Image (spheres, helix red, strand yellow):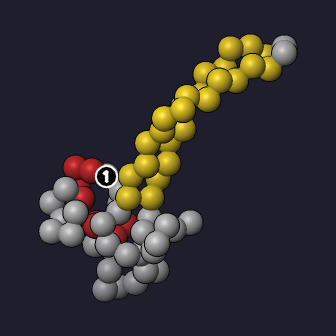
Amino acid sequence: MLIKGLKFDLRLYALICGCDPLRIYLFKDGLVRFATEKYEGVDEDNKTDMFRHLTNYAINKDNPNF
């Protein structure tokens, strides 16, 4: 899945309080991280482009397009 051509990861936080009956609380806030280059399928030319394939902040903060 892509959002506007960018890879992303999404974290939602939930607390499970009981199994019988099942009680799950979903925290209102979450976390989304995006890559900084548009995703294209992996080929020989772009397979080492970390800005296209990874969503880590520590990597993407060094991209001029950040």
Residue 23: image location, x then y, percent: 75, 19
Residue under pointer 1: 56
Please, which residue is most extreme toward the front here?
28
Relative to the observer, which residue lies in front, 37 or 43? 37
- The N terminus lies in quadrant: bottom right
Q: In this view, does 32 lie above or below 49?
A: above
Q: Residue at x 45, y 58 (%)?
A: 8
The quadrant in which residue 50 appears is bottom left
Give the side of residue 41 with respect to residue 18, left or right: left
Q: In this view, does 55 lie above or below 23?
A: below
Give the side of residue 18 with respect to residue 10, left or right: right
**Amino acid of disc 1:** Asn
Residue 28: image location, x then y, percent: 54, 32
Relative to the observer, which residue lies in front, 20 or 44? 20
Q: In this view, does 40 lie above or below 52?
A: below
Label 1 CA crowd tier, 10 Å (few <14, some 14–19, many 20+): some
Please, which residue is most extreme toward the right here?
20
Give the side of residue 29 with respect to residue 54, left or right: right
Q: Is residue 53 above or below residue 17?
A: below
- The C terminus lies in quadrant: bottom left
Q: Which residue is drawn at 43% across and 80% down?
A: 40
Residue 36: image location, x then y, percent: 30, 66
For numbered disc 1, what is the local secondary structure?
Answer: loop
The quadrant in which residue 15 appears is top right
What number of labels is visible? 1
Residue 20: image location, x then y, percent: 84, 14
